Image (cartoon, rainbow, N blue to C red):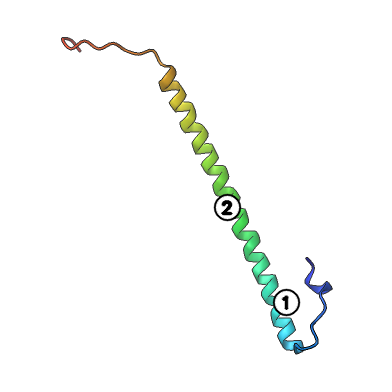
Amino acid sequence: MDPEKLSKPKHLSEKTWRQHLRWMSVGGEQVEENFARHLSRMKEDASRCRELWERHQAVVNAQPRTRSLFSD
């Protein structure tokens, strides 16, 4: 949404309207930054999850070792 295309309500002063537009701009920037950080964390977590899954599969598919109680 382009704030410049919004019309100023009649009951607001020009100063208040500019403050509101600035607030919307800053809020939009914060949302974009937070979303980018969130996506980055999701990708890291997905990578870790994939690595753990691969390790788990390696353990599950490994040949079971029989251990004797009488020898090492």
Q: Position of residue 69 (x, y in %)?
A: 18, 12
Q: Position of residue 46 (x, y in %)?
A: 54, 39
The residue sitting at 44% across, 26% down in the picture is: 56
Most extreme residue toward the left, as rendered? 70
Q: In the rendered image, which quarter is residue 1 located in?
A: bottom right
The residue sitting at 74% across, 83% down in the picture is: 17
Q: Secondary structure at mark 1?
A: helix
**Residue 69 against residue 17 in the figure, above or below:** above
What kind of residue is marked 1? Leu
First in sequence: mark 1 or mark 2?
Answer: 1
The residue sitting at 46% across, 32% down in the picture is: 52
Q: Return the mark for residue 21.
A: 1
Q: Secondary structure at mark 2?
A: helix
**Residue 35 against residue 23 in the figure, above or below:** above
Q: Return the mark for residue 72.
A: none
Distance of label 1 from label 2 (alpha carbons)? 26 Å
**Residue 25 against residue 15 in the figure, above or below:** above
In the rendered structure, the answer to whether residue 42 lies left or right of residue 62 reads: right
* Residue indicated by mark 2: 38
What kind of residue is marked 2? His
Q: Position of residue 26 (x, y in %)?
A: 66, 71
Count all numbered tags in the image, as a single digit. 2
Rendered-image quadrant of the C terminus: top left
Question: Is disc 2 surrounded by few (<14), some (14 to 19) or many (20+) residues within 10 Å?
Answer: few
